Every structure is written in structure tokens, then in C-alpha cells.
Image (cartoon, rainbow, N blue to C red):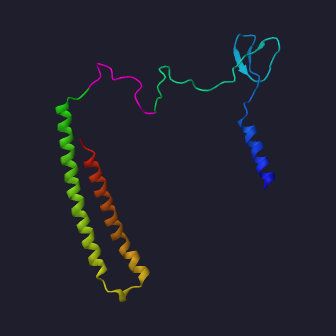
Amino acid sequence: MMRFSVVTLCAGFLLTTPVWGQVYRCTDAEGRVTITNVLIDKTNCKRMQIEADTAVPPPADGKKSRPGTASAPTPPGFPSVSADEQNARNDTRRTILNQELADEQQKLEGAKNQLATQEKVPVGMEDAEKREARLRPFREAIARHERNIEDLNREISHLR
């Protein structure tokens, strides 16, 4: 066990150490420039100085930036929507979501009624496994409608 830990520690150390290598800028007879780590011709190749630090510098303003956020304020000519128009859009969206919610609730009731009808089939005609397989789609439909109702309620609650 100790041997594995030592080997793992050494491997981790080797993987985290910086890699140092030579980089050359070579120019051929026609003037084409090639940058390589292999010394092609000593007379037409020059060793390049490369700094080992490859870390990305912080933003110039010193603020921490988050991915997906705007780095500059909205430009003055950028199209925008008035508050009244946005409120009208939100009202329209709320109306549509409420209609979808009512539809989903009706579908849920229908799915529950279908399941109740299927559960009334006498048990003696089929074994438990076949019965479960027959009822599974009805239970899945109920679960799907319940998830849709939860999602619609969440969406409605996030409207301003």
C-alpha cells in the first residue's frame, strides 16, 4: 500500500512540473518561416525565447468576470422594449401558460380516469407481471402530466 502511494505521489509530481523545451524559428532558402522544436539547419535557425508562464492574466479592470455575462454596458443604440410593451408581453405569456396549465390538468384527470378503468379489469384474467406491463403506460402518462403541471406552475411563478 505504501509503495502505491509513493508511486502515485511521484507520478503526480512529474505530471505537474512544467515542460521545458527548445523552440526554433527557421527560415529556408525561399524565405518561408517555420517554427519547430526540431533544429533543422544550424545556419538558418534561431532559438526563440519563450517564457514559461502561460497563465491567463486577470481582467484589466480588476473585476472578476463570469462566463456568459456581458463585459460592457448596453450600447445606447441597442434596441430595447418599453416597460408597457414588456408588461403586455408578460401578460400574454401568463395567459398562454394558464391555458396550457388548464389543458394539462384536464389531461391529468383523463389519464387518472383511464388508469382507474384499466385497474377495474379482473385480476384473475392475467398474472401480476402482465398486469403491471399493461398499467405502466397509464401510470407513466399520469407522471408526465404531473411533471408538466409542476413545470408550468414554476414558469408562471417566475413571471414578473
Q: Residue at x 34, y 70 (%)?
A: 139
Can you give x and y, in whole percent of width and height, for residue 118 in the image? 30, 78
Above or below for 7 versus 87: below
Q: Nearer the viewer, residue 39 or 12?
A: 12
Split into 4 quadrants, where in the image is the C terminus? top left
Say whether residue 13 is left or right of residue 117: right
Q: Residue at x 77, y 14 (%)?
A: 45
The stretch in magenta equals 67-79
Say whether residue 65 is left or right of residue 101: right
Above or below for 54 versus 122: above
Q: Residue at x 36, y 23 (%)?
A: 73
Split into 4 quadrants, where in the image is the N terminus? bottom right
Q: Residue at x 27, y 25 (%)?
A: 79
Can you give x and y, in whole percent of width and height, for residue 17 in the image? 73, 33
Say whether residue 159 is left or right of residue 130: left
Can you give x and y, in whole percent of width and height, for residue 78 in the image? 29, 22
Magenta stretch: includes residue 68: yes
